[in-house]
Image (cartoon, rainbow, N blue to C red):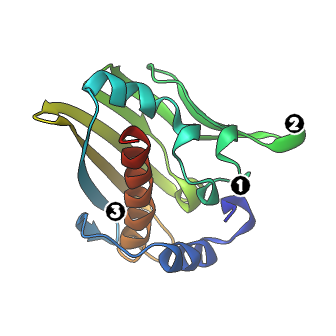
Amino acid sequence: MKFGAWPLAATAAVMAAASPAAAAVKSATVAGFELETKVLVRATPEEAYAMLGRVGEWWNPDHSYSGNAANLTLRPQAGGCFCERMPGGRGSIEHMRVVQARPGKLLRLQGGLGPLQGEAVAGSLTWSLAAVEGGTEITQSYIVGGYIRGGAEWLAPLVDAVLVEQLKRFQARLDR
């Protein structure tokens, strides 16, 4: 699915059909939501952090504007961009901006993903990494607040499903 080609409601319906919702919605109201998911990867925190920066290797291209994950980049340093270039030089998209980068420990980005980009929201996506026996525990949280046409509570499980899918793809890529 290419987010730019779909209105918000259609995008949400397709996202719901593509991925079952996970039990990671911590809270949801008309004004925002909080999502959290944890996975264990067989990699060191440093290896996991480095893979976060190689987003084009694990992000599902169906959840991009160009339909090609190779067009995605993520520079894991403060001010760095989670960006996407459009084919043929037809533009670019800033998905999120890095606001905190602590290699091997934490990467935090701010912005609205997918259909949230067109809404009046602030979003904070955080990956926290902790060394545990057998690898690294990664906690992914996304907190969104602001004005979302139709309210945020209906969108929370749909966004959760997409982010859980991305985290599972990230996990699978590291566990290869």
Residue drawn at point x = 30 percent, y = 70 percent: 22
Residue named by callout 2? 89
Is tag 1's residue or tag 3's residue first in the polypeptide sequence? 3
Q: Secondary structure at mark 2?
A: helix
**How many angstroms separate mark 1 from mark 3 (CA)?**
28 Å
Q: Amino acid at mark 1?
A: Gly
Residue drawn at point x = 52 percent, y = 31 percent: 54
Q: Quadrant of residue 60?
A: bottom right
Residue drawn at point x = 52 percent, y = 74 percent: 18
Is tag 3's residue or tag 2's residue first in the polypeptide sequence? 3
Q: Are marks 1 and 3 in contact (CB under 8 Å)?
A: no
Q: Quadrant of residue 48?
A: top left
Q: Amino acid at mark 2?
A: Gly
Residue drawn at point x = 38 percent, y = 51 percent: 167
- Per the rendering, the mark at residue 14 is none
Q: Would you place residue 82 above or below residue 172 in this image?
A: above
**How many angstroms separate mark 2 from mark 1 (CA)?**
15 Å
Dividing the image into 4 quarters, which one contains the C terminus?
Answer: top left
> Which label sits in the foreground, 1 or 3?
1
Residue named by callout 3? 32
Q: Amino acid at mark 3?
A: Gly
Circle 2 packing at 10 Å, graded few (<14), some (14-19), many (20+), is few
Q: Quadrant of residue 138?
A: top left
Dividing the image into 4 quarters, which one contains the N terminus?
Answer: bottom right
> Which label sits in the foreground, 2 or 1?
1
Question: Of 40 and 25, which appears nearest the observer?
Answer: 40
Circle 3 packing at 10 Å, graded few (<14), some (14-19), many (20+), is many
> Which label sits in the foreground, 3 or 2?
2
- Per the rendering, the mark at residue 67 is 1
Question: Residue 98, how many percent across, how many down?
Answer: 45, 29
